[in-house]
Image (tube, rainbow, N blue to C red):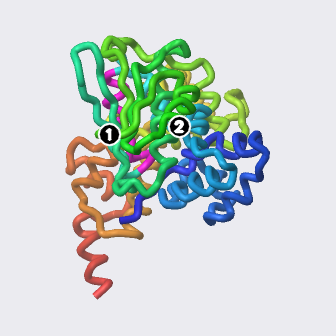
């Protein structure tokens, strides 16, 4: 099975490689990742390409823990608007539950599991389907390092894990090197890749880094700053597209994710002769058109992924868009292909 990951997962890669004295574009070309692909952080590329890029980079730079260093340069903004959505939750526990539920929007085949090894500690484990046989050494490093950075964004720079565990065996020298990177004890040969921290943190309200949305906008829209230059129609459409599968794509949630008051969002969209409701319908219609061209979807699942609570509501919208019901459309399309 082919797994895909957002190219936004490479946030900070080119800067780090340049800082280390190498040419990142030469390394990227070796695994067939093109410069033009970086224009859209939400572009999904084969996970295998990213895994091989990290292995190649670590080998050629002679840095066996390159992945851990890269993850330290990342954080909530690496996740795009899902990261902005997470910090709107009232507790860290709910933010992590959100991450576990929607991590597939960032990287396919990645599973987050929250457990409690003791009454005082909790464990956030990460499982990578692409790395079931442990053929990649860098993916667990960058993944756990990113998780730590995300937690630090939400709990403050002074926060530290109790320890970090890796399935791969680590010689003593490697453990000491990684402890320098992570700033906490590191253990190898564990049953899972996980980060263990004080359970009391789960009840804390996540912090929202002051520059979080500005970083997301800058990454998403190629250098634009969060000011009047930003096209809020484009930004709102993007937010709707990202949050639709979460089932929480209300106008209020969109506004919060964009760090705007709901009424200000309404005003900004009104100034561009549109509304949240109009953009929601446009995004839904665009997604349906793309899906129908490329696949034969399960209509009920499609309706749920578009945020409809009832299939009948989806069916009414579909008929308004295309003049026929979705069921009739699929039957007609199937007959035309015979």
Q: In which quarter of the image is the N terminus?
A: bottom left
Question: Which residue is pictured at 53% across the width and 22% down the height?
Answer: 183
Left or right placement of residue 129 versus residue 150 in this view: left
For residue 161, which numbered disc appears in the image? none
Q: Is mark 1 on a helix, strand or loop?
A: loop
Q: Distance between the residues labelled 1 and 2?
A: 18 Å
Please tell me how crowded label 1 is: few (under 14), some (14-19), or many (20+) other residues with Cα within 10 Å.
some
Question: Which residue is pictured at 37% across the width and 49% down the height?
Answer: 128
State the image coordinates of residue 67 (x, y, percent, origin top left).
56, 43
From the image, give the main secondary structure of the stretch colored magenta: helix
Q: Quadrant of residue 190?
A: top left
- Residue to which mark 1 is pinned: 192
Left or right placement of residue 314 versus residue 138 in this view: left
> Does the magenta portion include 95?
yes
State the image coordinates of residue 159 (x, y, percent, origin top left).
48, 15
Work out whether residue 76 can be spotted.
Answer: no
Left or right placement of residue 15 versus residue 48 in this view: right
């Amino acid at each position: 099975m082919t797994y895909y990951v957002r190219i936004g997962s490479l946030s900070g890669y080119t800067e780090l490689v340049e800082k280390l004295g190498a040419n990142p574009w030469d390394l990227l070309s070796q695994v067939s990742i093109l410069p033009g692909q970086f224009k859209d952080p939400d572009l999904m590329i084969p996970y295998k390409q990213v895994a091989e890029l990290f292995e190649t980079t670590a080998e050629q730079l002679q840095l066996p823990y390159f992945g851990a260093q890269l993850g330290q340069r990342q954080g909530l903004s690496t996740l795009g608007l899902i990261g902005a959505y997470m910090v709107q939750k009232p507790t860290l526990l709910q933010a992590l539950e959100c991450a576990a539920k929607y991590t597939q929007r960032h990287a396919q085949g990645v599973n987050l599991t929250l457990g409690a090894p003791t009454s005082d500690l909790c464990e956030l484990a990460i499982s990578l389907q692409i790395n079931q046989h442990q053929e990649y050494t860098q993916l667990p490093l960058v993944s756990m390092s990113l998780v730590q950075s995300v937690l630090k964004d939400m709990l403050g720079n002074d926060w530290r894990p109790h320890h970090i565990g890796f399935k791969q065996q680590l010689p003593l020298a490697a453990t000491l090197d990684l402890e320098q990177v992570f700033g906490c004890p590191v253990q190898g040969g564990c049953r899972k890749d996980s980060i263990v921290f004080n359970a009391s943190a789960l009840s804390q309200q996540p912090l929202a880094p002051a520059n979080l949305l500005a970083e997301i906008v800058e990454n998403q829209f190629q250098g634009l700053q969060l000011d009047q230059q930003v096209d809020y129609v484009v930004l709102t459409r993007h937010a709707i597209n990202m949050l639709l599968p979460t089932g929480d794509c209300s106008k209020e949630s969109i506004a919060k994710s964009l760090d705007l008051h709901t009424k200000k969002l309404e005003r900004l969209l009104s100034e561009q002769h549109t509304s949240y409701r109009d953009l929601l319908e446009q995004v839904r219609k665009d997604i349906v058109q793309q899906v129908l061209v490329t696949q034969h979807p399960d209509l009920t699942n499609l309706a749920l992924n578009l945020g409809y609570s009832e299939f009948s509501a989806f069916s009414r919208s579909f008929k308004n868009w295309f003049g026929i019901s979705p069921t009739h459309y699929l039957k007609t399309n199937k007959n035309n292909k015979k």
